[in-house]
Amino acid sequence: MKILITGSNGLLGQKLVYLLQKYPEHQFLATARGVNRVTQAGSFQYQSVDITNRDEVMKIAESYRPDAVIHTAAMTQVDDCEDQRELCWNLNVDAVANWIEACKSVNAHLVHVSTDFIFDGLHGPYTEEAVAAPLSYYGESKLEAEKLVLDSGISASIIRTVLVYGIAEDMSRSNIVLWAKGALEKQQPIKVVDDQFRTPTLAEDLAMGCYLAAVQKANGVYNISGKDFMSIRELVARVARYFKLDDSLVQTVSSSTLNQKAKRPPRTGFILDKARRELGFEPHSFEEGIALVMSQFRK
């Protein structure tokens, strides 16, 4: 199988590069905007692509002719999406329309990555059949992209995920686990909400879920996340406990005190029965995920 990855410089994209190198029976092409930042993975095919440029997307699809496209590229900074709505729509909706057209032209399966932020967080954890009601413009854009995929008639998987954490090369953004560990190691007081609940997702697990959907050409929506449901406050406490750090530095606050531009859903998280049953997906526990991340720090 020939697989094309978008967003290969991001956390998930990098994990897919490393994962696919373990399966030499598949060819893959990594794509992102600008230069390749995955320098420690050895030799692999890479090409710069602007996903908002329809002509570029069509050209690379028709030249490489993938059997599957794993579309990870997106604008995911939730507050920035509130301020930069046109850019958010271009990256999260218009770009998806480009890849749908490209997949149609070469008869490729599309794996599209979505988010728990399509929900209002009143009834989590969610199954794949739950009714979406986004609270933020980011959530609206990701829901609209899902609708485009589902209405397109192409062979496609929608992979919904939650609060991804992990470590990658040349990271442009941190994530909750690395942030908490770094701050507590420096003995910095931090504020953490106790009224948001998630099933945090190890980036390697999300990459495996995308891979399983691609090689099986699984049609429909799949929840791919961690299996441990917890508050953000509990997450930080478990990070502190794992690394034997001082949890008393953590000040528990409510979401309303943070004055964030975009509303966050209070209670999401996912039920994974469908992905387990149909894809054979099984995530790490949260502590196993932390251990894996830390083993990569030491390399």
Image: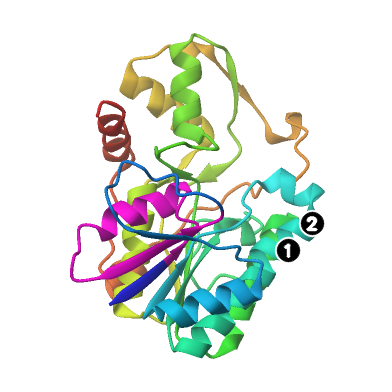
Identify the amino acid type marked 2: Arg
Query: Badge 1 is on which residue?
Result: 89
Q: For the magenta stretch, what is the residue range?
A: 5-33
- Residue 272: x percent and y percent? 37, 62
Taking the spot 75% from the left edge, 29% from the top edge, the residue there is: 257
> Is residue 32 a member of the stretch shown in magenta?
yes
Q: How many badges with numbers are in the image?
A: 2
- Residue 72: x percent and y percent? 49, 60
Taking the spot 59% from the left edge, 41% from the top edge, the residue there is: 196
Q: Residues within 10 Å of mark 2 (few under 14, many from 20)?
A: some
Whether residues under marks 2 and 1 lie with C-beta atoms below 8 angstroms apart, the answer is yes
Q: Is residue 104 left or right of residue 75?
A: left
Taking the spot 65% from the left edge, 50% from the top edge, the residue there is: 265
The answer, for residue 226, to whether it is visible in the render is: no
Query: Badge 2 is on which residue?
Result: 85
Q: Is residue 25 above or below residue 81?
A: below
- Residue 122: x percent and y percent? 63, 55
* Residue 139 marker: none
Q: Quadrant of the N terminus?
A: bottom left
Give the quarter of the image for residue 253. top right
The answer, for residue 35, to whether it is visible in the render is: yes
Taking the spot 31% from the left edge, 59% from the top edge, the residue there is: 208
- Residue 267: x percent and y percent? 58, 49
Q: Is residue 52 above or below residue 76?
A: below
> Is residue 51 a member of the stretch shown in magenta?
no
Q: CA distance from mark 2 to mark 1?
A: 6 Å
- Colour scheme shown: rainbow
Q: Is disc 1 placed on a helix, strand or loop?
A: helix
Q: Quadrant of the C terminus?
A: top left
Q: Is disc 2 placed on a helix, strand or loop?
A: helix
Identify the amino acid type marked 1: Trp
